[in-house]
Image: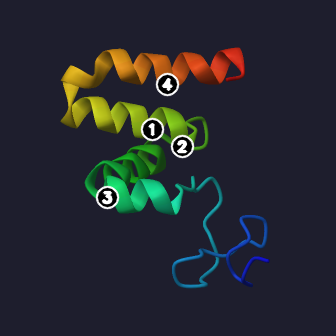
Amino acid sequence: MGRPGFSPDNGTDPADGTPASPGRVGFSLARWALAPETTWQARRLAAEFGPGMDARTAWVLARLARHPEEHVYAMQHLEGEESGC
């Protein structure tokens, strides 16, 4: 059972309950806990790009900017999305 205010469809930001801005992408709690700097950078990147960038793509781009040696893993992550994995 979920808590009120944490539904992605109710139009509020789960962090503080304020109205979410249109086009804001969301990231899981696991991403915030395990890689907070990358996730923060991904959120900023998606906000600057606009509504055409999804959360997964923004996160991969931010991760590669900080850790270019993870290129192979990032591409597998994105290709898994396309193949439905």
Does 78 appear above or below 40? above
Residue 58, numbered label: 1
Residue 77, numbered label: 4
Say which element carries label 3: helix
Name which residue lies at 37% across and 21% down: 73
Q: Residues within 10 Å of mark 2 (few under 14, many from 20)?
A: some
Q: Which residue is mark 3?
A: 36
Distance, label 3 to label 4, CA atoms, is 19 Å
State left or right for residue 81 relative to residue 63.
Answer: right
State left or right for residue 6 relative to residue 28.
Answer: right
The kind of residue on which mark 3 rests is Pro
Q: Which residue is mark 2?
A: 55
Q: Are marks 2 and 1 in contact (CB under 8 Å)?
A: yes
Q: Residues within 10 Å of mark 3 (few under 14, many from 20)?
A: few
Residue 66 found in image quarter: top left
Q: Residues within 10 Å of mark 4 (few under 14, many from 20)?
A: some
State left or right for residue 22 relative to residue 61.
Answer: right
Does 43 appear above or below 58? below
Q: Nearer the viewer, mark 4 or mark 2?
A: 4
